[in-house]
Image (cartoon, helix red, strand yellow):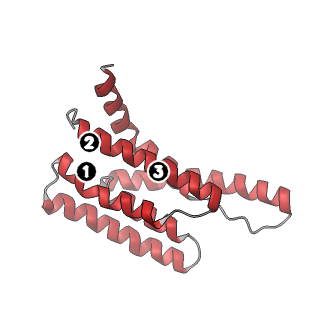
Amino acid sequence: MQGNIFIYGLVGALAIALLVAAFTDIRRRQIDNWLNAAIALGAPAYWWAQGLMLWPDVAMQVGVALLAFVVLAGLFALKVMGGGDVKLLSALALWIAPLDFMRMLLFMSLIGGVLTILFAAWHFTVTRKRDAKIPYGVAIACAGLITLAPTLEAGWRSVTGA
């Protein structure tokens, strides 16, 4: 990636969308469909700006996103994961290279584990019930931002000249 301001703008917009997803998940325990759709629909512009070829680059991005959706939809059917989380992760898979996506899932799992412990403990302390609803969109957004950090940093440096 060689200083394409359009790429940095798209990744910056994705970062803002991830923050919105995290805050709405904290506030309402819901990630809006329009936000997930906007993230997914922004991916082709990112592919074009990155110069990805339809085969194999774009095909691999779409394949990983479809595989993520199928696996995560299974977790949703088992009531292990929320629908908004499934859609957000599937949309993110369109943006993030497959190996980086796997790394992001690892970050998400670690952050999500800590988040679950903290929210469950807080919820139990306040209500004495064990039915806490965890805003897992926070873990997804944090992991996505960690994964996107090198691109965001490079964009910031190119804009500021630092």
Say which of 58 and 22 sits in front. 22
**Residue at the spot 20% in from the left edge and 34% down from the top edge:** 2
Specify whether 64 is left or right of 30: left
Of callouts 3 and 2, the N-terminal one: 2
Q: Residue at x 13, y 56 (%)?
A: 53
Please, what is the three-letter code of the amino acid marked with disc 2?
Ile
Q: Nearer the viewer, residue 155 or 17?
A: 17
114 or 96: nearer the viewer: 96
Report x, y in % for residue 13. Answer: 38, 46
State how far apart marks 3 and 1 are (Cα).
16 Å
With 107 as the anchor, is 60 left or right in this view?
left
Q: Is residue 48 left or right of residue 8?
A: left
Mark 1 secondary-structure assignment: helix
* Mark 3, residue position: 18
State the image quarter where residue 30 is shown. bottom right
| Classed neighbour count for the residue bearing mark 2: other residues with Cα under 10 Å, few (<14), some (14–19), many (≥20) | many
42, 57: nearer the viewer? 42
- On-image quarter of the C terminus: top left
Callout 3, which amino acid?
Answer: Leu
Label 1: which residue? 46
Whole-angstrom CA distance, mark 3 to mark 2, is: 16 Å
Badge 1, how many Cα within 10 Å: few under 14, some, many 20+?
some
Q: Position of residue 62 (x, y in %)?
A: 27, 65
Q: Are marks 1 and 2 in contact (CB under 8 Å)?
A: yes
Disc 2: which residue: 7
Looking at the rendered structure, the kind of residue marked 1 is Tyr
* Residue 107 visible: no
Residue 127, quarter of the rendered image: bottom right
Residue 4 position (above or below residue 28): above
